[in-house]
Amino acid sequence: MKRPFAELSGTGSYAPPRVMTNDEFSKILDTSDQWIRERTGIRERRISTKEETNACMGKAAALQVLEQNGLTPLDLDAIVYATASPDRLLPSQACDLQAILGAKNAAALDVGAACSGFVYALSVAEGIVAAQQAERVLVVAAEKLTSIMDWSDRTTAVLFGDGAGATLVRPCTGTRGILSSYLKSDGTLAELLYRRGGGASHPPSEELLKDHSYYIKMAGREVFKAAVLSMADACDQALRRAGLTADDIDLLIPHQANIRIIEATAKHAGVPMEKVYVNVDRFGNTSAASIAIALDEAVKTGRLTAGMTVMFCAFGAGFTWASMVVRW
Ligand code: UT7
């Protein structure tokens, strides 16, 4: 087994206090609590207010991580920010966080890998640390998806939620740390899950507003199938690269999009559901933030403790998929 270059130190998360139940959706859309629960496992999700910007949520999660590490923002060498719903397109979300944290000594960059964003960002941070470019890299994953979803489309609106999670990646001090990672993509399938409008090739226009092109569009069934296959591939690859088997995994934290995808992934990976962290019922799909929020909950509730081996696996728009095995 390779000696890890980098470890994760401290976790934080932020969930907007406003809880929206499935029954509330059934008052504004042709849907029901029963359909949403049975098809997705989601019972409720968190909805941010206008004041709860992506950067504010990211900051709240980041401050917990800094406090646990006894650091101030000035101690940070870099900020890597995973998001698909930045407050604005330019500059990066990481730069906005750098400014509001006052992290004057930090480089700042965004990672655009949608729901795989947190695992991608951890891997980028690991690389920066391994290249001895930085010693303290703050990794934040935050989403304000309810601002970019189509509230009139029942096939997507009921799925998403808002929130943020964070951790610190730093050089290894012992045997704990990142044992393996695996990143993959297939951009030929981009239009199964995407936002057409708003970028440089489709700048703002009346037409884009009218046809709801600023919102996330998804071919759910196709994405579902790809998610199951890709997350299975991701688990296999991360285990193989770490020289481990499913029996060595104490906790699996998969991307939280749909309980049926989570169950199929766990079954393929050979990890029993008792060892799988699930919070999709309470948060819905928070894209890049989902594994980061679940990680923080797992640590704070004692599900993940020092010495355990945890595996992350994710899948999202791009398509992108990714996995990582970490000795905690
Ligand atoms: O996070 C990154 C990736 N995202 C995902 O992994 C999400 C992947 N996809 C999924 O989780 C599932 O495909 C969905 C939850 C989005 C949909 O579940 P499904 O079992 O694949 O349903 P479906 O798309 O096959 O639709 C079945 C029926 C359709 O009606 P007809 O055509 O059979 O009459 C839909 O119109 O369910 C209908 N439907 C709904 N009914 C009530 C779709 N959305 C809803 C809804 N409420 N919210």
Image (cartoon, helix red, strand yellow):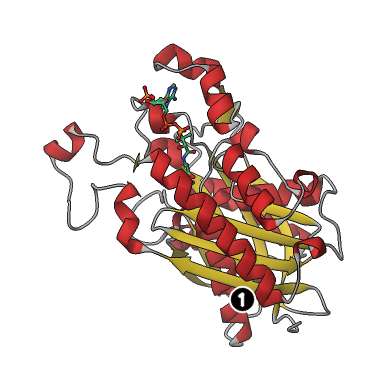
Residue 175: image location, x then y, percent: 83, 78
Q: Residue at x 60, y 36 (%)?
A: 283
Mark yes or no: residue 215 visible.
Answer: yes
The outermost residue toward the top is 27
Residue 264: image location, x then y, percent: 62, 46
Label 1: which secondary element? helix
Q: Residue at x 53, y 43 (%)?
A: 286
Q: Is residue 28 left or right of residue 143?
A: left
Q: Residues within 10 Å of mark 1 (few under 14, many from 20)?
A: many
Mark yes or no: residue 101 visible.
Answer: no
In which quadrant will I find the N terminus?
Answer: bottom right
Q: Amino acid at mark 1?
A: Glu
Q: Is residue 308 left or right of residue 239?
A: right
Q: Residue at x 41, y 51 (%)?
A: 86
Q: Residue at x 24, y 54 (%)?
A: 199
Q: Is mark 1 within 8 Å of ligand 1?
A: no
Q: Up-down: is 50 above or below 295?
A: above
Q: Up-down: is 219 above or below 142?
A: above
Nearer to the camera, 110 or 291: 291
Residue 118: image location, x then y, percent: 56, 59
User: What residue is shown with label 1?
Assistant: 126
Image quadrant of ligand 1?
top left
